[in-house]
Amino acid sequence: MYGPDRSAADEVEWTAFRRAEKKYKLYYDKDSRNSKKFDKPIPLRKKQPKKVDLSEVLDFKEILESYSKSSELHPEVVPLQCGFDRPVFCLKTRPGFYFIPGALSVEEQCKWIRESLTSFPQPPNRTNHNARYGPIHDLFISAKDQKVLVVEDNSLAQLDSESDACRNGDAKTWKFYEQHTAALGDKSCKSISASKLLRKLRWSTLGLQFDWSKRNYDVSLPHNKIPDSLSQLAKGMATPAMPPGEEFKPEAAIVNYFGLGDTLGGHLDDMEADWSKPIVSMSLGCKAIFLLGGKSREDEPFAMFLRSGDIVLMAGEARECFHGVPRIFTDKENAEIMPLEVHFSREIDFLEYIRSSRININIRQVF
Ligand code: OGA
Ligand code: MN
């Protein structure tokens, strides 16, 4: 909404959380397309991301490496001694927050990326596309097959005007067609390519369905149980944040899909009944910056990198802390997805998707 260059007077009105969001958010250099120092013609020059100072971003990969080598730690970080089978770190001033660096193997990461794109968005699970297009089956395969989503003929006949079809999805039926068939129909606004829909996929919900308009769980909506293998994984990963002997019960999950420039604004997840239970949050694909604030937006947030395979737990007091994702990195140097690229080298569709995307699966006990 706002550009990066607002006056200092405006800045003091922002909360500390908002200031950090603005600091890390992707902005483009205003002059990078016009500057005289470039000799390429303007259309061939790529927009240049504004440089951002990452020196204050906590890097748990480095923290783990130096801790393993020399037991040296960042002054804010404490290792958790809990007999868990891999290193877990906490923050001194954010009790209930746990970071498990590199918790998932590359094979596991690939499995969950595949699931997130092929099976998790399948009905009855809902996605951000439901409101406009109704349930959509086989989005990923349809994108691969270059299909096009088109309003079915019967509903076309009922339309008063073209713009109705675009604005109001609820009464219409949308269906995938081969590209050449779709081209027989006219009017661009009554169809959309599957690949565009895939790029615009922002979330899907598993298990109990979260209703974003009411910001709560709608138990009346049809749903499947969280897949067993995801449930088992979450139970295991949740143990550092669980009271001894108690088992985490995964009942719902939200899958977030981020493309370049997408952000998740500062928020609390407060619709679950028991905040002593953790949210288990796994990162896949391109590296991101995560902001963990305090109980007020005025509290200075910690910024940290989230890499593919990292798992974060938020339980107890940390459930009351504002958090969000102001930035993902898709450039080669910062995205850090080389191992995924190697794994997906013969699966071009997954490869292309993940090169410019991040996926976050966060698993919750609702009751
Ligand atoms: C969320 C969330 C964090 C992330 O979906 O509620 O906080 O890492 N996601 O994407
Ligand atoms: Mn959240």
Image (tube, rainbow, N blue to C red):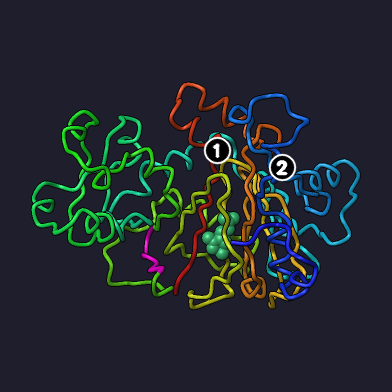
Q: The residue tagged with tag 2: helix, strand or loop?
A: loop
Name the image quarter holding residue 315.
Answer: bottom right
Residue 325, how many percent across, how many down?
Answer: 62, 57
The stretch of residues the image draws in magenta is 206-212
Against 333, is 115 above or below?
below
Badge number at residue 31: 2
Viewer-closest of 148 and 367 = 148
Quadrant containing the C terminus in the rendered view: bottom left
Viewer-closest of 117 and 245 = 117
Q: Is mark 1 within 8 Å of ligand 1?
A: no
User: Which is in the foreground here, disc 2 or disc 1?
Assistant: 2
Name the image quarter holding residue 20.
Answer: bottom right
Q: Which of the two labelled residues, at mark 2 and mark 1, occupies the earlier sequence position? A: 2
Q: Amino acid at mark 2?
A: Asp
Per the image, the residue denoted by label 1 is 356
Quadrant containing the N terminus in the rendered view: bottom right
Residue at horizontal 44 percent and vertical 38 percent from the top:
114
Residue 133, how many percent across, how many down?
Answer: 27, 54
Q: Amino acid at mark 1?
A: Ser
Residue at horizontal 43 percent and vertical 43 percent from the top:
199
Residue at horizontal 71 percent and vertical 50 percent from the top:
305
Name the image quarter holding residue 303.
Answer: bottom right
Q: Determine whether, in the image, residue 283 is placed left or right of residue 20.
A: left
Where is ligand 1, by quadrant?
bottom right
